[in-house]
Image (cartoon, rainbow, N blue to C red):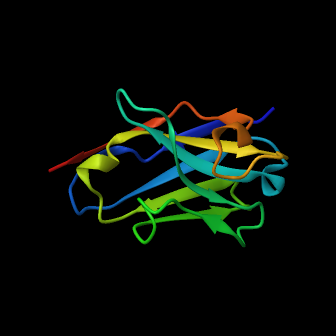
């Protein structure tokens, strides 16, 4: 069993930056694919970023490409989401997710077995 704990959310003005962190328990973090998703009020949860177990491959939707960067430090069992040029439409609860093995593509919600509790990001205009 893996537990994921997000931190780093908060209130920021449009154009600003935030870095989210997700700390994972367990000794097998380095074998996990990790992802970030977000959910705004009244909307479905959507994919934000994903990273392979080694960090060699990353995935982003067009909506955040060039503004968000996912990274990981396997020595610290932590995955990060650096967000810059934030927009009001980035306002959402951001969730960290992990999977040891999945037949589904990294952008799919069903591709993850473990989820954090979420951290709120609010971008004011």
Q: Position of residue 54 (x, y in %)?
A: 77, 67
Residue 72 can be seen, yes or no: yes
The x, y position of residue 21, in whole percent, is 53, 51
Q: Is residue 2 left or right of residue 41?
A: right
Report the side of 40 relative to 51 (left or right).
left
Q: Is residue 91 left or right of residue 34?
A: left
Residue 113 image position (x, y, % from top left): 75, 35
- Quick check: 16 above or below 115? below
Looking at the rendered image, the quarter that the N terminus falls into is: top right
Task: Report the residue at 35% width, 65% height from top.
Answer: 84
Q: Position of residue 53 (x, y in %)?
A: 77, 60
**Residue located at (50% from left, 58% from top):** 81
107 above or below 110?
A: below
The answer to whether any part of residue 3 appears in the image is no
The single residue placed furthest to the top in the displayed view is: 42
- Classify residue 67 by image quadrant: bottom left
Which residue is at 64% across, 54% downward?
A: 78
Q: Residue drawn 56% across and 48% down?
A: 36
Q: Give the answer, above or below, for where 40 lies relative to 56.
A: above
- The correct choice, above or below, for 60 with respect to 119 in the image is below
Taking depth in this image into account, of 81 and 104 the one nearest to the observer is: 104
Q: In the rendered picture of this protein, how many numbered marks are placed on residues? A: 0
Left or right position of 16 against 7: left
């Amino acid at each position: 069993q893996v537990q994921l704990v997000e931190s780093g959310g908060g209130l920021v003005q449009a154009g600003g930056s935030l870095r989210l962190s997700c700390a994972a328990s367990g000794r097998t973090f380095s074998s996990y694919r990790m992802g970030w998703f977000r959910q705004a009020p009244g909307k479905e949860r959507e994919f934000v970023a994903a990273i392979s177990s080694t960090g060699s491959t990353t995935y982003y939707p067009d909506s955040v490409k060039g503004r968000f960067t996912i990274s990981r430090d396997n020595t610290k069992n932590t995955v990060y989401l650096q967000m810059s040029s934030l927009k009001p439409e980035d306002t959402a609860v951001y969730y960290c997710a992990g999977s040891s093995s999945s037949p589904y593509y990294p952008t799919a919600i069903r591709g993850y077995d473990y989820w954090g509790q979420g951290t709120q990001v609010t971008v004011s205009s």
